[in-house]
Amino acid sequence: MSLQKLPASPILSPAARAGHIAVERALSDLRAGRPVRIAADGAAALVLGAEALDAEAAAGLAAFAPLRGRLVLAGPRLARLGAARAEAGAVALPGFDPERVETLALRIDARLDAPVLAAGPLDIAALELLRLALVLPAAVIAPLEDGQTGGDALRVEAHDILAHRATEVRGLRMVGRAPVPLDGAPETEFVVFRGGEGLRDQVAIIVGRPDLARPVPVRLHSACLTGDLFGSLKCDCGDQLRDTVRGMAAGAGGILLYLDQEGRGNGIANKMRAYKLQSQGYDTYDADELLGFGLDQRRFDFAAAMLRQLGVTAVQVFTNNPEKIAALTAAGLEVVSDHRVLGRSTPQNMSYLAAKRDRAGHRIDLDTMQAG
Ligand SMILES: Nc1nc2c(ncn2[C@@H]2O[C@H](COP(=O)(O)OP(=O)(O)OP(=O)(O)O)[C@@H](O)[C@H]2O)c(=O)[nH]1
Ligand SMILES: [Zn+2]
């Protein structure tokens, strides 16, 4: 099959499309610090990211729900605050006190100061929306009474939020492609897809002319601004990126998927929050948990969909991360072999690499890595 012949991407139903668009607009509002109105099971509430709660926003929410607010926190954050639970929950906010909200949502020495209530479907959808918006997963909720509209806040349904990631995969489509010769890989084409994960586009970088009738060398590479672009010593991403492209160019070609999953899918702002915590002694996973994230937010089903749209059915995967291999296999691609991709070890990235090995099962052998 030729790389030029692309299968058409599936079309969403009108209802799914309307819901999808509402979620995209809601993400934009939340990122700008504006509340959105989420409805679930006949209930509705105004929802704002905890990081956007200042005195003015608090007064705005209090006008709708003066005494009945709540702060919804993710399971890992609640556990860090001392709660005996692993799942998301809420604490009552009798007023919308920005200082208390910041303490409970972000500070490292904070402890719970109120009982934890079970999180309902609206709360779960609010957290998911904040994760999709790449802001801190802590939701300030102002429940609306029957008949209260929530002013001009954008309206979104909880079920559309929860369906968003799957809808993104179904709506994934190619939007542009062009040759971009690279240093060390002169015959290279960039193919841009819209949809998937994150808030920007995904890029498939086709190096050389891989034979699609045979297993194609493939790397799924999550964006890392600090490592890929600036050569940060804190991780191994830049080396992995460049070494893989050069290796594909020197061999029979291959495809590198550059995925909009900065900070393991948490976004650059949360990654910097996590880096700050790491400078205070937490490892890469503990830091994410303190912020309310699980071990890894990323999904790779849309990466498999990108490969399929490019005509790939069987792959040789370049990764140390068993989750990537499992995800491609689960998505129906034949993973014929897997290969490790080792960058340099530096004094600054040793503990990061060791944490990936010990806590997330990455196949990293620090002794065989080249010191940088
Ligand atoms: N949250 C968080 N993300 C990080 C940190 N350090 C690096 N990252 C991100 O981790 C991701 C690493 O991506 P990859 O190298 O593709 O993935 P990997 O899981 O390490 O797997 P392989 O490299 O394929 O073995 C990038 O999105 C980085 O931005 C960190 O300390 N915290
Ligand atoms: Zn990195």
Image: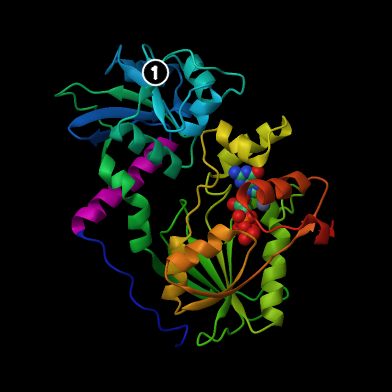
**Left or right for 216, reference 26:** right
The residue at the point 30 percent across, 15 percent down is 68
Q: Residue 284: which quarter of the image?
A: top right
Give the vertical position of 285 relative to 166 (above or below).
Answer: above
Magenta segment = 14-31
Residue 280 in sight from this viewpoint:
yes
Give the vertical position of 333 relative to 266 (above or below).
Answer: below
Give the vertical position of 307 relative to 362 (above or below).
Answer: below
Tell me where residue 353 appears, x and y as whole percent: 72, 50
The residue at the point 30 percent across, 11 percent down is 67
Q: What element carries label 1?
A: helix
Tell me where residue 325 appears, x and y as whole percent: 54, 64
- What residue does disc 1 label? 58
**Left or right for 31, reference 43:** right
Circle 1: residue type: Ala
- Label the magenta part by its dominant secondary structure: helix
Residue in front for this viewpoint, 118 or 244:
118
Name the quadrant of the N terminus. Answer: bottom left
Q: Residue 6: which quarter of the image?
A: bottom left
Asked whether residue 21 is drawn in magenta, I would say yes
